[in-house]
Image (spheres, grey):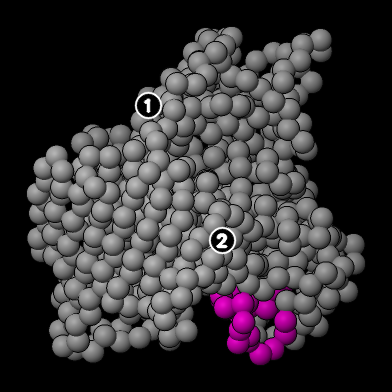
């Protein structure tokens, strides 16, 4: 196990996570844990990302199981697993059985027994299909009446269910034939890329059922999934390039970097001082029209700051007329405050709806946009949402007069384990490509892109997390304080090269999405009792990215698996962030010497104390770089005008 000190520096919590069992039976392999089968492979190729059995509450939170029994028996040719757990204080008793063999068959079954009425939004199996190599590929669907439909996995992200009434799925990936059969419930598929999950998900029960349904006391339900795999060849790993970094020029300039602020997130003078060190390009302030005077007063340190541009996200409460947008504009104008970018959204649209509705009564996003244009004639007016891409994809802006499109992102809507969070980096480029298809050739200015959930469009509120554990749909995620969030943010930045992202908001000054320490109503171990601890590692990523803004982008070809890169070319040097987004250390051949400063467990203490750590730390000059788990390297190398990279 990792020592508690390193757990805190990496993850912001000492929560111990038991490693998954690695199961190998012939050409089949997978990892097994108490919540599912992960990374099912055949001849070394991942063919199914996961088979899980989440039990969701009425707010779509995943209920924490109490494990009663967990056994595994295996040989060279087969493996058998049995898991017994309960949720809801014993109200639902679940028994899972998994059997796999070297012939390429895996069968999973679950029996759920309710001892009392048990309300849930979803209970039972889900199958997660990978997206790389799958998006746009052929899919054969067997329906309940026995008919077979030929279709395909969506290329652009589907706003609704691309496949319904599923009994069987057949498709091919990397030469492997995949045959999946479902029994005991009606299944359908959704495109989980909507929420930045790197998967398509086949699940039950269908969404035509009420979101919250009840398993009656005494009721028993059974489900079975059978997977059969055949064909395929082992992947060729002989062409690994070890010659060094291959830089490539990318189209466009590095995006502007912003910080999200809200009237409900008070900050101290010390935090304001630290924000000044970051020199971000803009502050993204969220205002509500029903507490206008209070909100403007509380946000005064940010919205009156002449050092950064001001962007506004305006929430229009249901009972507030759109004409009050003009009142807000007048208040700001009298105070000498002129926002550069403004987006307004009726509060009802902070919730998520199916693409077919029914939609809420009252003002529509299009009507709010038009009122915003009239109230702020000198600002660029945005279309889109203040939540996730999901809501943008389901409520698409009309081709009206707007200057940019916007949405945010939360990494822990469905799962909060470390692997799932890092897998969102695989889905973000596909989100941006789908955003581009909706943008009518206008740029994208991303709202808050965070691990935690600012709001919960799918329930009443984000999940409370007083214990500071890895918890889906929690607002305060402990990893925000660790090296993990810094590496993830570099990964997020690296994905912006696929679409002209004009601006991105990576953090707030303090609080659940903060880059600086400030006392909160939850425990922050490693910071609350350390008088000199002022910053989270993410601070240095935000600061470096802000300095890189508006310079020509560069990329890196053929990076090792798990390494994310974000870079620019200035007049006299290359600037590069390299982050290890995995639990495995990785040595990267650079080809020629670079100057690098490493943010890792060894430099963590110095980095969280000093906002100028990058200038005050000692650079290493070397042609190789070893990145420990979740470490980030801040790298520079001079270039000359007559030298050309790719």
- Residue 299: image location, x then y, percent: 66, 61
Among the 4 quarters of the image, the one containing residue 53? bottom left
Q: Residue at x 71, y 47 (%)?
A: 499
Q: Nearer the viewer, mark 1 or mark 2?
A: 2
Q: CA distance from mark 1 to mark 2?
A: 38 Å
Q: Is residue 219 magenta?
A: no
Determine crowd level at label 2: few under 14, some 14-19, many 20+ residues with C-alpha closer than 10 A.
Answer: some
Residue 7 higher or lower than 201, as above or below: above
Residue 163 higher or lower than 256, as above or below: below
Among the 4 quarters of the image, the one containing residue 637? top right
Which sits in the foreground, 460 or 262?
460
Which residue is label 2 attached to?
152
Determine crowd level at label 1: few under 14, some 14-19, many 20+ residues with C-alpha closer than 10 A.
Answer: some
Which sits in the foreground, 432 or 314?
432
Q: Is residue 53 left or right of residue 455?
A: left
Q: Is residue 317 left or right of residue 558?
A: right
Q: Is residue 112 left or right of residue 45?
A: left
The local secondary structure at tag 2 comes to: strand
- Residue 179: image location, x then y, percent: 37, 58
Which region is colored magenta? Answer: 339-364
């Amino acid at each position: 196990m990792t020592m508690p000190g390193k757990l805190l520096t990496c993850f912001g919590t000492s929560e111990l996570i038991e490693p998954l069992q690695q199961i190998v039976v012939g050409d089949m392999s997978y990892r097994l844990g108490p919540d599912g089968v992960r990374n099912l492979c055949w001849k070394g190729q991942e063919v199914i990302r996961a088979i899980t059995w989440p039990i969701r509450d009425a707010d779509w939170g995943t209920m924490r199981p109490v494990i009663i029994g967990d056994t595994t028996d295996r040989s060279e040719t087969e493996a058998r697993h049995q898991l017994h757990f309960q949720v809801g204080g014993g109200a639902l008793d679940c028994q899972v059985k998994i059997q796999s063999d070297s012939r390429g068959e895996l069968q999973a079954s679950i029996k759920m027994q309710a001892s009392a009425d048990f309300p849930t939004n979803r209970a039972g199996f889900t199958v997660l299909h990978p997206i790389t190599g799958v998006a746009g590929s052929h899919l054969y669907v067997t329906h309940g009446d026995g008919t077979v439909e030929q279709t395909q996995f969506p290329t652009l992200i589907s706003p609704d269910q691309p496949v319904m009434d599923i009994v069987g799925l057949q498709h091919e990936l990397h030469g492997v034939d995949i045959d999946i059969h479902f029994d005991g419930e009606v299944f359908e598929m959704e495109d989980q890329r909507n929420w930045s999950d790197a998967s398509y998900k086949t699940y039950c029960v269908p969404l035509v059922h009420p979101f919250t349904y009840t398993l009656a006391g005494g009721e028993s339900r059974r489900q079975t999934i059978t997977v059969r795999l055949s064909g395929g060849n082992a992947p060729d790993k002989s062409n690994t390039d070890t010659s060094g970094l291959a830089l490539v020029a990318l189209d466009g300039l590095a995006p502007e970097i912003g910080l999200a602020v809200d009237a409900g997130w008070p900050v101290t003078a010390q935090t304001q001082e630290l924000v000044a060190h970051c020199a971000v390009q803009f502050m993204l302030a969220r205002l509500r029209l029903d507490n206008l005077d209070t909100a403007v007063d509380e946000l005064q340190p940010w919205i009156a700051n002449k050092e950064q541009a001001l962007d506004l996200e305006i929430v229009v409460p249901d009972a507030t007329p759109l004409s009050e947008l003009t009142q807000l504009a007048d208040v700001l104008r009298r105070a000498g405050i002129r926002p550069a970018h403004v987006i307004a959204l009726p509060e009802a649209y902070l919730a998520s709806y199916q693409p077919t509705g029914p939609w809420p009564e009252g003002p529509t996003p299009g009507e709010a946009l038009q009122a915003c244009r009239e109230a702020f004639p000198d600002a660029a007016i945005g279309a889109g949402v203040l939540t996730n891409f999901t809501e943008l994809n389901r409520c698409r802006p009309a081709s009206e007069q707007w200057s940019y499109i916007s949405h945010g992102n939360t990494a822990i809507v469905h799962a909060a384990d470390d692997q799932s969070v890092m897998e969102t980096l695989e889905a973000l480029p596909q989100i941006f490509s789908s955003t581009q298809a909706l943008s009518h050739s206008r740029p994208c200015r991303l709202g808050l892109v965070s691990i935690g959930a600012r709001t919960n469009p799918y329930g009443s509120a984000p999940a409370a997390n007083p214990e500071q554990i890895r918890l889906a749909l929690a607002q305060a995620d402990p990893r925000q304080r660790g090296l993990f969030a810094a590496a993830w943010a570099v990964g997020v930045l690296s994905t912006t090269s696929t679409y002209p992202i004009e601006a991105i908001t990576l953090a707030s000054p303090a609080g659940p999405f903060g880059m600086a320490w400030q006392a909160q109503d939850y425990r922050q171990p490693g910071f609350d009792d350390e008088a000199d601890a002022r910053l989270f590692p993410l601070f240095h990523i935000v600061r470096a990215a802000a300095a890189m803004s508006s310079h020509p982008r560069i990329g890196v070809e053929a990076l090792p698996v798990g390494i994310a890169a974000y870079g620019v070319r200035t007049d006299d040097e290359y600037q590069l962030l390299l982050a290890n987004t995995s639990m495995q250390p990785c040595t990267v051949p650079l080809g020629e010497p670079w100057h690098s400063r490493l943010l890792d467990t060894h430099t963590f203490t110095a980095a969280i104390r000093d906002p100028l750590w990058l200038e005050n730390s000692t650079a290493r000059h070397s042609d190789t770089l070893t990145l420990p788990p979740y470490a980030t390297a801040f790298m520079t190398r001079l270039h000359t005008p007559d030298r050309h990279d790719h």
